Amino acid sequence: MSAIALDDALDRALAERRVVGAVVQVAREGDIIYRRAAGLADRESGGVMRDDTLFRAVVAEQADLHGGRNGARGAGSAGAG
């Protein structure tokens, strides 16, 4: 995925209010090839997201900025039928 595609996906997610803010970093073979902070770090205070913003929670799964399900199953879907 190119930097332009990443920028577009992040801009869309912000415009569609799917996220308030994000920090995206991509590394290839140990080298950072893309880094961007966008949106708000704190919606209430209006604090701007920075690439060194500390987060209260960490989600350990790959983000899916294309709106797909990313392989996740809804509750009760396993073995249903």
Image (cartoon, grey):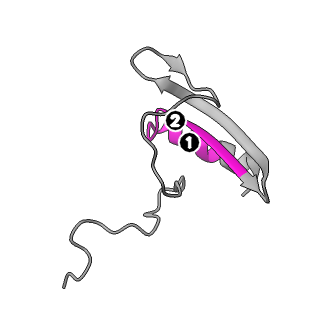
On the image, the x and y values in percent for residue 24 come to 63, 43
Cβ–Cβ below 8 Å for labels 2 and 1? yes
Image height of 75 relative to 23, above or below: below
- Which quadrant of the figure contains the N terminus? bottom right
Residue in the picture at 53% in, 30% down: 54
- Residue 12, which numbered label? 1
Judge the density around disc 2: few (<14), some (14-19), many (≥20) Cα neighbours within 10 Å.
few
State the SS at label 2.
helix
Q: CA distance from mark 2 to mark 1?
A: 5 Å
On the image, the x and y values in percent for residue 58 come to 46, 44
- Which quadrant of the figure contains the C terminus? bottom left
Where does the magenta region start and end?
8-26
* Residue type marked 1: Arg
- Residue 77, which numbered label? none
Image height of 80 relative to 37, above or below: below
Residue in the picture at 44% in, 69% down: 71
Judge the density around disc 1: few (<14), some (14-19), many (≥20) Cα neighbours within 10 Å.
some
Query: What residue occupies the far top of the structure in this picture?
Result: 45
Q: Is residue 55 left or right of residue 75?
A: right
Q: Is residue 81 left or right of residue 63?
A: left
On the image, the x and y values in percent for residue 22 come to 55, 37
Q: Which is more toward the observer, 16 or 49?
A: 49
The reply to whether the magenta stretch includes residue 20 is: yes
- Residue 15, which numbered label? 2
* Residue type marked 2: Ala
State the SS at label 1.
helix
Residue in the picture at 73% in, 52% down: 27
